[in-house]
Each structure stands twice: as structure tokens, then as C-alpha cells.
């Protein structure tokens, strides 16, 4: 989870914004008025940022502030201030507009406990440079974002992204959206071994190839199933085939009615995926990441149905294109051709505990067969 700081300095309705921010467990509230921070709960970091208030000197009493962000040109260095205000964490604000200020940002990233960075140009290359310069440093980089869309980009720069984002909310709801955008680290899944009990050629139907904007690893694919409570790990086309080149961005995923997983534990039908959709990539150890769909190819093909069971008797079904080159993953990353599967073979799968309503997990009675 990335850090989320909400900048309320210019908020029109601070009370409503603060209520939402606390409810959503935003990590920090940023203000240039110490009184705004006084009554915040201990679950929220209180950040005093007096930039632009023309304070030649900091107040003698920093009140409840946990972190104070300063400009060394106005207030002195963090080391000097820490000696005057013991027990308060200090960070450095850097506005990046040219090569000199970019070097200031890199130096701050290497040495400061907190670095608050404002990039004036829309390119993210300067942020990439600062992130690279900070590799191995113990401090945290917080980057100013204009909106939630920019925050999502900042979180993903150089794969690692900034440690956090500071954003000024324009309306109630922005704090919720920012917190959701910060959840870029997905949780691992507990995959299980399933035993194939039957396969059947079921005739023609439409299947979906999910072409993503990412390069899958050889032990990675997406989870697909006819029922929301049972899925099988379909491998990407990273493994060589005799008659075509590999397509490491693609998973030949299954019939269009099938479920697959996306962010926040939600399911989507393969038929509703489109350019820009998000799906969850999963490897044989259960490690996950969210990838973006570039396109979905839906075409009529012969189909094969695969029935499997977990060791505790739960049934799983997957309907795939009926062709040898369409594959699933087995224990240890074994690549298994779907048309060669037979009773007794073991495949990897996932057994969600919840039923689904419009893709969201919900605890209610639901019979799928």
C-alpha cells in the first residue's frame, strides 16, 4: 500500500474532507494551519506544511504536528531544525523546474527522512531519475499529484513508483478515490491442486483471448472458471509452439461466459473485458499483480470442457478452446496441453470463498452448476 497524503490547505469544506479522510484511513493530513491538525486521531499522520504562508520563522510550538515539511531556503535544514524541535520529524520540499532543482531533489531523496516533490513539467522522466537516485535510501518520497489519475501514474513509475502521493481534494469523494488508487500492491492467493475428473468436447462457441499490455512470465497466467467459486490457472503464451511465434502478452483464457479475477477481489466475465480493463496475473506460487488489457479477441472455436475437484470435494469447471496449444498450469509450473488432460491429472486452481453479485464478493446463498 502506497502512502496517501491529503492536502487540505485550500479545501472549501475542510470538515467534510477530514471526515471522509479519517473514515478512509488516509495516511496523512497536510495543512499550513496547526489548528487543523489538533483534533485528528492518532491513526492519521499530521503534516504541517507552511510553504507559501510567508513564515520567516516556524512557530515556537509546532503543536500536534508529526512531520513538518520545510524549504531550507526559508526555514533552515532538517538537521538544524531537529536540534531546535526534538521529537518532530522534518522533511524537505523541492519544486523541480530545471536541472539544478532536479539535483536538489535527488540529494533530498538520498538524505532526507521525507522528501515532498512538486514537478512542474508533465513528463515523469524527472521522477524516474529521482526514484533511481533514491535506490537503497531509507527516506520516503512523496510526490504532488493534481488528481487521482495522475496519482495512479505516479504510483507506477519505474514499477516501484513514488512511496506516496500528496493530493489536494477538489470535492468530497476524492479521498476515497485516492485511497483506492494507492492499493497497487496485490495480495497473494492460496492456490490449490485440483484433480481432473473428466473432459468433454462440447462443440462450437466463442472464446476470448485476453491480450494485455504486460509481458507474462513463463509460470504466470490468469485464473479462469465457469463458476465464481472455482478457477483454473490458464498459462500465458510464453512457451514455444511449433507453428507460431510466442505471444507473451496473451492468455487464451476460455469461453466468454467465464469468470476471471481483477483488483479488489472482484470478478469479471471474459466477455465484458475491453481495452483498459484490469485483470489479475497470477503465478504458480500465488503471487499476483494487476495488468492492463490491451484488447480482447473473441472468435468462434471448438470448445473443450474440463471438470476438476479439490481434495475436499469442491467442483471446478473450465471451458477452453479445443486445441492442443491452449494450456493450463500444473504443480511446479508444469505446462499442460488442454486436449491431453485426463482423469487423475493435477492442475493448479483457486477456490474463492464468497459468492458474487455483479462481480463483488458477497456472503449469500448462490448455487452454480
Image (spheres, grey):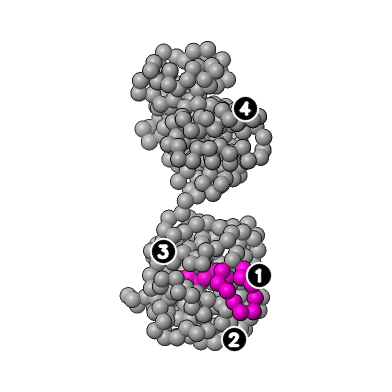
Disc 4 packing (10 Å; few <14; some 14–19; many ≥20): few
**Closer to the camera, 52 or 268?**
52
Q: Of marks 2 and 3, which one's residue comes earlier in the chain?
A: 2
**Closer to the camera, 189 or 15?**
189
Q: In this view, does 254 lie to the left or right of 85?
A: right
- Residue plotted at (44% across, 25% down): 90
Residue 285, disc:
3
Q: Mark 4: which secondary structure?
A: helix
Q: In this view, does 232 lie above or below 20?
A: below
Q: Are marks 3 and 1 in contact (CB under 8 Å)?
A: no
Q: Are marks 3 and 4 in contact (CB under 8 Å)?
A: no
Q: Of marks 4 and 2, which one's residue comes earlier in the chain?
A: 4
Q: Mark 2: which secondary structure?
A: strand
Residue under pointer 2? 203
Q: Are marks 2 and 1 in contact (CB under 8 Å)?
A: no
Residue under pointer 4? 100
Residue under pointer 1? 297
The magenta segment: 231-247
Residue 50, disc:
none
In this view, the mark in front (1 or 4): 4
Q: Is residue 214 above or below residue 205?
A: above
* Spot occupied by residue 126 in the image (x, y as percentages of width and height): 61, 37
Amino acid at each position: 500500500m502506497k502512502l496517501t497524503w491529503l492536502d487540505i490547505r485550500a479545501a472549501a469544506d475542510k470538515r467534510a474532507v477530514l471526515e471522509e479522510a479519517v473514515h478512509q484511513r488516509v495516511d496523512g493530513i497536510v495543512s499550513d494551519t496547526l489548528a487543523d491538525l489538533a483534533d485528528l486521531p492518532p491513526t492519521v499522520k499530521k503534516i504541517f506544511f507552511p510553504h507559501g504562508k510567508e513564515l520567516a520563522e516556524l512557530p515556537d510550538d509546532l503543536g500536534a504536528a508529526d512531520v513538518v515539511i520545510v524549504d531550507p531556503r526559508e526555514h533552515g535544514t532538517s538537521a538544524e531544525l531537529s536540534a531546535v524541535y526534538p521529537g518532530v520529524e522534518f522533511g524537505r520540499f523541492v519544486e523541480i523546474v530545471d536541472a539544478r532543482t532536479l539535483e536538489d531533489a535527488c540529494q533530498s531523496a538520498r538524505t532526507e527522512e521525507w522528501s515532498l516533490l512538486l514537478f512542474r513539467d508533465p513528463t515523469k522522466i524527472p521522477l524516474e531519475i529521482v526514484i533511481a537516485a533514491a535506490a537503497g535510501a531509507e527516506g520516503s518520497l512523496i510526490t504532488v499529484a493534481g488528481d487521482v489519475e495522475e496519482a495512479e501514474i505516479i504510483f507506477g513509475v519505474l514499477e516501484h513508483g513514488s512511496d506516496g502521493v500528496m493530493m489536494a481534494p477538489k470535492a468530497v469523494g476524492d479521498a476515497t478515490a485516492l485511497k483506492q488508487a494507492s492499493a497497487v500492491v496485490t495480495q497473494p492467493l492460496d492456490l490449490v491442486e485440483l484433480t481432473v475428473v473428466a473432459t468433454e468436447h462440447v462443440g462450437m462457441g466463442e472464446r476470448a483471448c485476453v491480450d494485455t499490455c504486460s509481458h507474462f512470465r513463463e509460470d504466470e497466467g490468469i485464473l479462469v472458471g465457469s463458476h465464481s467459486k472455482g478457477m483454473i490457472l490458464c498459462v500465458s503464451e510464453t512457451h514455444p509452439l511449433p507453428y507460431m511465434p510466442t505471444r507473451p502478452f496473451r492468455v487464451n483464457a476460455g469461453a466468454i461466459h467465464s469468470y476471471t479475477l481483477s483488483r479488489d477481489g472482484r470478478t469479471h466475465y471474459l466477455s465484458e473485458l475491453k481495452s483498459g480493463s484490469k485483470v489479475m496475473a497470477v503465478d504458480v506460487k500465488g503471487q499476483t499483480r494487476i495488468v492492463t488489457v490491451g484488447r480482447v479477441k473473441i472468435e468462434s472455436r471448438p470448445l473443450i470442457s474440463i471438470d476438476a475437484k479439490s481434495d475436499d470435494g469442491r467442483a471446478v469447471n473450465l471451458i477452453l478452446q479445443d486445441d492442443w496449444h491452449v494450456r493450463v498450469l500444473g504443480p511446479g509450473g508444469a505446462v499442460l496441453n488442454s486436449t491431453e488432460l485426463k482423469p487423475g491429472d493435477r492442475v493448479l486452481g483457486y477456490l474463492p470463498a464468497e459468492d458474487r453479485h455483479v462481480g463483488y464478493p458477497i456472503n449469500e446463498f448462490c448455487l452454480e452448476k
